[in-house]
Amino acid sequence: MAAVSADPRVEAYAKLLCERCLRVQPGMQVVIRTTPLARPAVLALERELARRGAYPILRIGFDLWPSNPPWAREAPTELLAEMSEIDTFASDHMDARVTMDAPENTFDGTDLPLERLDLAKRGERYFYRRTMAGEIPWVSCAFPTQALAQQAQMTLTEFEDVLYAACLIDWEAEGERMRRHLARFDAAEQVRIVGHETDVTLSLAGRTGKVDDGHDNMPGGEFFFSPIEDSAQGSILFSEVPAAYRGQRYGTVRLEFRDGLVVDASATRNEKAFHALLDTDAGARRIGELGIGCNPGIPRAMNFVLFDEKINGSIHLALGQSYEVVGGENESAIHWDIVKDLRRGGRIELDGETVQENGDWLI
């Protein structure tokens, strides 16, 4: 019999994922995607699921994306763009999913040729369709590894402390606080984001947002929208938090929007890959999500978007696929969250009224 983890926070974490994030019920089939490095959390999840009469369906691999890099390098291109029948079946029949990032090396898979990377991402899109539509409960989360700690420029102990501080909090109280702010956004038509070399407007007219108070992501701590697809106007500079996607680093990114489309863009790193990403498909140059970060347990950027997009006093824009659950209509093979920290010289306006300045709420 497997021993219980020596760190009691791992058991509390697994309980939180099953109880709050997935709301596990008897008979549910829960797909768990992660790597062997997350073994303590996987064992804790199995115990929690067993207590609830649910099934753990383990998908343990050395990499979570894109569809196993060693295979993706060699497979015929026609296979890359489609999931296998058994994975398609699992996607259609799973009752919930856990995707737990636990990398050994955060750069694994980044050496794939761009055309193969694009096909592999298209092939994985089907797996996420039911969760993007809000049909089943899901959670994206992480387990502390040396790779994630190094990426955050922390010791493993420091990274563990931030992870659990950001996750094991009073989510009921945080949810109530975020819903108060969300109500003001829901009543607004136009959002304006102003900051260093940034002045961009978006329309939320006729759409409402959703609070993630520890359900869809862990850590949670944001509320988000899918803006009107052709509404983005102006420019934004993401200079505070280095931009990254699927292991590729893009440094400081600048985007200029006209009628909802990115019409001009630059990155300080990997420009060829950056522009190829923007040209993934017709929806890759439109905004699929506007998110407002609210988590008080994340003190600074960790070079890991799952955490960085929740920094209290930050916003993030996601290029590509939108969320149907909040009325989004944009379709794309990508969903790329890019984070801007507004805590030093930034503000958010709603219909001309400043509601947040330098990360502090005025409402």
Image (cartoon, rainbow, N blue to C red):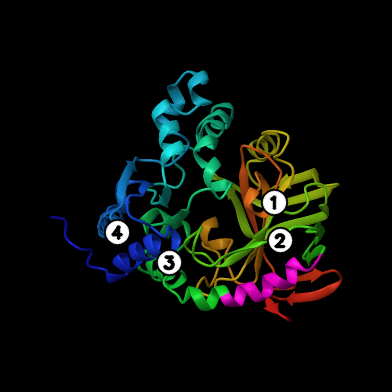
- Closer to the N terminus: mark 4 or mark 1? 4
Q: Nearer the viewer, mark 4 or mark 3?
A: 4
- Closer to the N terminus: mark 4 or mark 2? 4
- Label 3 element class: helix
Q: Using the numbered discs, state the Cα–Cα distance from disc 4 to disc 1 in whole angstroms.
A: 33 Å
Q: Are marks 2 and 3 in contact (CB under 8 Å)?
A: no
- Closer to the N terminus: mark 1 or mark 3? 3
**Is residue 257 one of those drawn in magenta?**
no
Work out whether 173 lies above or below 309.
Answer: below
* Residue at which label 2 appears: 208
Q: Using the numbered discs, state the Cα–Cα distance from disc 4 to disc 3 in whole angstroms.
A: 25 Å
* Residue at which label 3 appears: 163
- Closer to the N terminus: mark 2 or mark 3? 3
Amino acid type of the residue tagged 2 in the rendering: Thr
- Label 1 element class: loop
Residue 137 appears anywhere in the view: yes
> In the image, residue 341 lies at what x, y percent?
66, 66
User: For residue 59, which quarter of the picture?
Assistant: top left
* Residue at which label 1 appears: 327
From which residue to which does the magenta span run?
Answer: 176-188
Work out whether 20 lies above or below 101.
Answer: below
Q: Do the residues labelled 2 and 1 touch (CB within 8 Å)?
A: yes
Q: Which residue lies furthest to the front in this view?
A: 26
Disc marking residue 52: 4
Amino acid type of the residue tagged 4 in the rendering: Arg
- Of 361 and 85, the residue lying toward us: 85
